[in-house]
Image (tube, grey):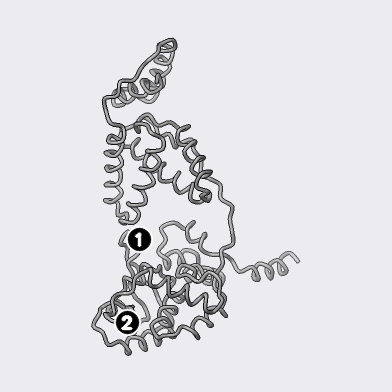
Amino acid sequence: MIDILINDIEQAMLNTLSNEQLCQLRKVLEYAFRNVSVTEIKSEDTEESNSVLVSAFLSSKSVEGCSEKTIAYYRSTLNNALLKVGKKISHVTTDDLRTYLSNYQKESGASKVTVDNIRRILSSFFAWLEDENYIVKSPVRRIHKVKVGKTVKEIYSDEALEIMRDHAGSSRDLAMIDLLASTGMRVGELVKLNKSDIDFQNRECIVTGKGDKQRKVYFDARTKIHLQNYLSERTDNNEALFVSLLEPFERLLISGVEIRLRKLGRTLNIPKVHPHKFRRTLATMAIDKGMPIEQVQHLLGHQSLDTTLQYAMVNQNNVKLSHRKYLG
């Protein structure tokens, strides 16, 4: 309780004292209160107080261009953490958050990647509180990134791609597979496309990615032919590039693409068939064939080069050949 009282005093003096003076003040207060017992009189609803700051933080992220899906994920993550900790935000300590993350992993069986995502969101939130002078110092500063072991994520082989094309079952699914494979676009970008977005002459289209950022992606001649065949068979007036196969021919949703690809994978006995795997396959093939990593980054619409490198796995056969050439 003494620590909470000292934190409150520090908060009150935040705009008056320098960091060095605040550190000295804490030492003086800790000495002065060494033999003092304090009882808390609750005058403010902790949950309501926390909710106000969480809402303010989420508003700032919305202004920065975060999607509604990201905002919802931030909200649930922060609310769950603060509810478990059960303290007013200004009283939350590093140990509180370390304990929360440790218990969360044990109780939920979550992966290290998930736990680090939670740590990252907490870090962003408390850093914002510090920048906005709501707290003196972020308690997440001393919680380091969770070390995650690297795993080689699978990509589609050339044979698997050809088998999926041969057994697509409809001109729509064939065009969809080709477009995902040749552009590396996200499935969310695919379902937003309209027929008018496709430039067949230059074999390119503009997609809207995360944060409503637009970029050009490019497709090959085979994709062009299959797209044109699919569109020529359409009898509906929907502006969407991909629609359902049955009336009323509504725009295809992300879930619709995922369900169709999973079903195709099960039928053909191809493991882990999903839209994102096309994206990883394209990145790996592009880097493996010598495309500069910066161009791959632009093609995929990544802000960080590190993200692009996580998507791409160098072909192990090429590593073996290079080892024999340079070291064998």
Bin the neighbour count of mark 1 within 10 Å (Cα to Cα): few under 14, some 14-19, many 20 and up: some
Amino acid of disc 1: Lys
**Residue indicated by mark 2:** 246
Q: Secondary structure at mark 1?
A: helix
Residue lying at 43% horizontally and 66% vertically, measured from the top left = 300
Bin the neighbour count of mark 2 within 10 Å (Cα to Cα): few under 14, some 14-19, many 20 and up: few
- The percent position of residue 214, horizontal first and vertical second, equals 32, 66
- The image's mark for residue 25 is none
Point out the frontmost of discs 2 and 1.
2
Q: Is residue 76 above or below residue 304?
A: above
- The percent position of residue 127, horizontal first and vertical second, equals 38, 39
Residue lying at 26% horizontally and 51% vertically, measured from the top left = 63
User: In this view, which residue lies farthest toward the right?
Assistant: 328
Amino acid of disc 2: Leu
Q: Secondary structure at mark 2?
A: loop
- The percent position of residue 40, horizontal first and vertical second, equals 34, 20
Q: Is residue 252 above or below residue 137?
A: below
- The image's mark for residue 210 is 1
Residue lying at 69% horizontally and 68% vertically, measured from the top left = 320
Quick one: 210 or 92, which is closer to the camera? 92
Image quadrant assignment for residue 198:
bottom left
Q: How many marks?
A: 2
Q: Is residue 302 left or right of residue 72?
A: right
- The percent position of residue 272, horizontal first and vertical second, equals 53, 69
Q: Earlier in the sequence, mark 2 or mark 1?
A: 1
Q: Quadrant of the C terminus?
A: bottom right
Image quadrant assignment for residue 315:
bottom right
Q: Quadrant of the N terminus?
A: top left
Residue lying at 34% horizontally and 82% vertically, measured from the top left = 245
Quick one: 291 or 218, which is closer to the camera? 218
Q: Is residue 313 above or below residue 18?
A: below
